[in-house]
């Protein structure tokens, strides 16, 4: 992929309006790899006072979009599975990392782990994706 194409993809990803609204930032992008992060704000909490699952899903999707589009072709998620292993809350900094794992039937699979360090330990959500790509 040309450097110009890579810059255009990164610019488009970093300009995502919904990610910006949430304060999600893409920290790193590499071939088939990306890291994104955000700080949980009080309005991102659910009725239990913990981070809303939609916020975690969005952070995962931001990192996934960056990694899956990093090769210069348009890619979107086909399937998403998330397991919420521990709760997070306001003020917590969440970071999502996604990387290519392999492929099945021509469909690449990626895994994303969203991690947060806290005084009480590590919070984590795991997410698996199927991906569809389009050349063009």
Image: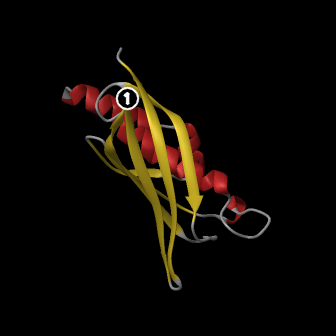
Of 102 and 43, which appears nearest the observer? 102
Q: Which residue reaches farthest top?
A: 136
Q: Quadrant of the N terminus?
A: top left
Residue ID at (30%, 27%): 72
Image height of 49 relative to 78, above or below: below
**91 lies above or below 31:** below
Which is more toward the observer, 94 or 132? 132
Picture quadrant of residue 50? bottom right
Is residue 118 in view from this perspective? yes
> What residue does disc 1 label?
105
Residue sitting farthest toward the front: 105
Q: Nearer the viewer, residue 65 or 26?
A: 65
Q: How many marks?
A: 1
Q: Up-down: is 129 above or below 119?
A: above
- What is the x, y in percent for residue 10? 35, 37
- Which element carries disc 1, helix, strand or loop? loop
x, y percent for residue 107: 39, 31
92 lies left or right of 105:
right
Instruction: Please name whichever residue, 101 or 90, is drawn nearer the observer in this view of the structure.
Output: 101
Residue reaching furthest right?
A: 47
Vertical position of residue 94 compared to residue 129: above or below: below
Q: Position of residue 84 (x, y in %)?
A: 59, 62
| Residue 52 coordinates in the image, percent (x, y) | 68, 59
Is residue 14 visible to the viewer in this orientation of the structure?
Answer: no
């Amino acid at each position: 992929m040309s450097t110009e194409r890579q810059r255009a993809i990164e610019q488009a990803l970093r300009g995502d309006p919904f990610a910006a609204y949430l304060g999600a930032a893409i920290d790193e992008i590499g071939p088939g790899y990306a890291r994104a992060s955000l700080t949980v704000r009080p309005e991102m909490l659910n009725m239990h006072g913990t981070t809303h699952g939609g916020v975690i899903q969005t952070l995962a999707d931001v990192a996934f979009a960056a990694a899956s589009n990093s090769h210069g072709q348009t890619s979107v998620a086909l399937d998403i599975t998330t397991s919420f292993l521990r709760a997070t809350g306001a003020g917590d900094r969440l970071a999502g990392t996604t990387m290519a794992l392999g492929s099945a039937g021509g469909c690449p699979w990626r895994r994303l782990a969203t991690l947060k360090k806290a005084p009480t330990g590590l919070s984590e959500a795991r997410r698996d994706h199927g991906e569809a790509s389009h050349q063009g």
